[in-house]
Image: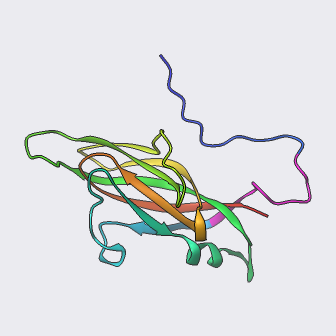
Amino acid sequence: HVVADVVGYMLSGQDPLTRKGRVVPLSSPYRAFDTREAQWGGVALGPGMAEDWSFSAFATSVAIGAEAVGNQLAVIGNLTSASVTRQYASVPVQSFLTAYPANGGRPLSSNLNTAEGPAIPNMAILMYGTDATVTVYNLFGYAHYLFDASAVVMND
C-alpha cells in the first residue's frame, strides 16, 4: 500500500519570458499567523469550521532589495498543528486541516493530518484565492495551528 501527496509539478515548454510558477525564496521564514496568539484571534478552529486568512499585506511586502517581486499565486511554508483538543472529553480526536483558495470549493484532500499530542508540521503550498486569501478547514476537535512562510510562487 502506498500513499503519495503531490504538492507540485513541473511543466516543460513554458514561455521563458514569463515568471509564472517560479519560486522566490524568502531570506528568512515569516510567521504569517498563529491561532494561539491574541494578535491572530487566539481562538482554536472548531469542528467542521473554516476560516479565512488574508495574505495581501504579506504578498505586497515581499521584495528583492527595494523592488517588490510582483504578483503571486501561492505561498510555500510549514503548516503546523500546534494542538488539537477533544470535542468530547471521553473521545480521543484525530482530524485534518485543509487549506485552499478562498471562494473556491474545499478539495477532498488534506494538507495536514492532526492528532492529540506534540505539534505536527508539514510543508504546504497555499494557493491564493480572491484578494490573496486562503481558507483553512478543520474536521474534528479544536485546532490551534500556524503557518510559517518560506517562499512565494510568482503569477506573472
Residue 125 in magenta stretch: no
| Along the viewing direction, whichever of 42 and 120 lies nearer the viewer | 42
Q: Residue visible at 24% across and 45% down?
A: 117
Counting from the top left corner in percent of width and height, residue 124 is at 53, 50
Residue farthest toward the bottom in the current orientation of the protein: 66
Name the image quarter holding residue 51: bottom left
Left or right of 42? Residue 147 is right
Name the image quarter holding residue 68: bottom right
- Magenta region's main secondary structure? loop
Q: Residue visible at 58% across and 61% down?
A: 150
Q: Residue visible at 58% across and 62% down?
A: 129
Task: Name above or below for residue 20 compared with residue 91.
Answer: below
Task: Name above or below for residue 21 compared with residue 10.
Answer: below
Residue 16 in magenta stretch: yes
Residue farthest toward the left in the current orientation of the protein: 90
| Along the viewing direction, whichever of 95 and 129 lies nearer the viewer | 129
Total label count? 0
| Along the viewing direction, whichever of 131 and 155 lies nearer the viewer | 131
| Stretch of the chain drawn in magenta | 14-26
Colour scheme shown: rainbow
Left or right of 121? Residue 47 is left
Which quarter of the image is occupied by the C terminus?
bottom right
Counting from the top left corner in percent of width and height, residue 14 is at 87, 47
Task: Name above or below for residue 141 compared with residue 27.
Answer: above
Q: Residue visible at 33% across and 66% down?
A: 35
Name the image quarter holding residue 91: top left
| Along the viewing direction, whichever of 116 and 94 lies nearer the viewer | 94
Left or right of 124? Residue 151 is right
Counting from the top left corner in percent of width and height, residue 12 is at 85, 40
Counting from the top left corner in percent of width and height, residue 114 is at 33, 43
